[in-house]
Amino acid sequence: MKTSFNRQKQYYILIDESGTLPDPRDKFIIIAGIATDVIKNANVLVARALESLRQRKVKIKEVKFYYAGDQTKRQILSGIVSEGLEVFLIAIDKKGRKVPDNPENFALLVGELIKEVNLWQPKKELKIFIDIIN
């Protein structure tokens, strides 16, 4: 007797945030993710960006896109395209409010992003990585 398994294809999403919840000067909070069926594609993108920065004698553990130079931004964005990665994001207008910085609020925001991913990739098993630093 042949047994068939209903196996979902794995889909990897690397999530990070920009902005801080309790700081009223941060008008927006951005929760963004890059996603792929092949995790190696995302790793290649990050490794290339970091290596390029190191070759220019920039000591860095994490690329902060907001502070990155134009050359680094272009490299990252073109890498997203060339590696076939998908981008998901949500932007939250804080309207000048302080929002308590706690795991519950962060989870609510990440949960909203995951809902969006599931709308576009409903048949895939998500493997989620949050705020990963190489």
Image: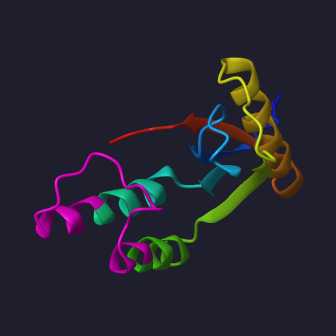
| Scheme of colours in the image | rainbow
Q: In this view, does 64 lie above or below 124?
A: below
- The residue closer to the viewer here, 17 or 28, is 28
**Residue 84: quadrant of the picture:** bottom right
Q: Is residue 5 above or below residue 64?
A: above
Whether residue 36 is visible to the viewer of this picture, yes or no, is no
- The residue closer to the viewer here, 31 or 1, is 31
**Residue 106: quadrant of the picture:** top right
Q: Does the magenta stretch include residue 51?
A: yes
Which residue: 70% across, 39% down?
Answer: 126
Q: Is residue 64 magenta?
A: yes
Q: Where is residue 134 in the image (x, y as percent from the top left)?
A: 32, 42
Q: In this view, does 57 lie above or below 108?
A: below
Which residue: 74% across, 19% down?
Answer: 104
- The residue closer to the viewer here, 37 or 4, is 37
Q: Is residue 26 above or below residue 50?
A: above
In the displayed structure image, the side of residue 68 where residue 127 appears, left or right: right
Q: Where is residue 119 in the image (x, y as percent from the top left)?
A: 89, 52
In the displayed structure image, the side of residue 120 where residue 16 appears, left or right: left
Which residue: 81% across, 30% down?
Answer: 3
Specify the segment rendered in magenta: 50-73
Whether residue 55 is visible to the viewer of this picture, yes or no, is yes
- The residue closer to the viewer here, 60 or 67, is 67
Name the quadrant of the N terminus. top right
Numbered circles on residues, count: 0
Q: Position of residue 45 (x, y in %)?
A: 40, 63
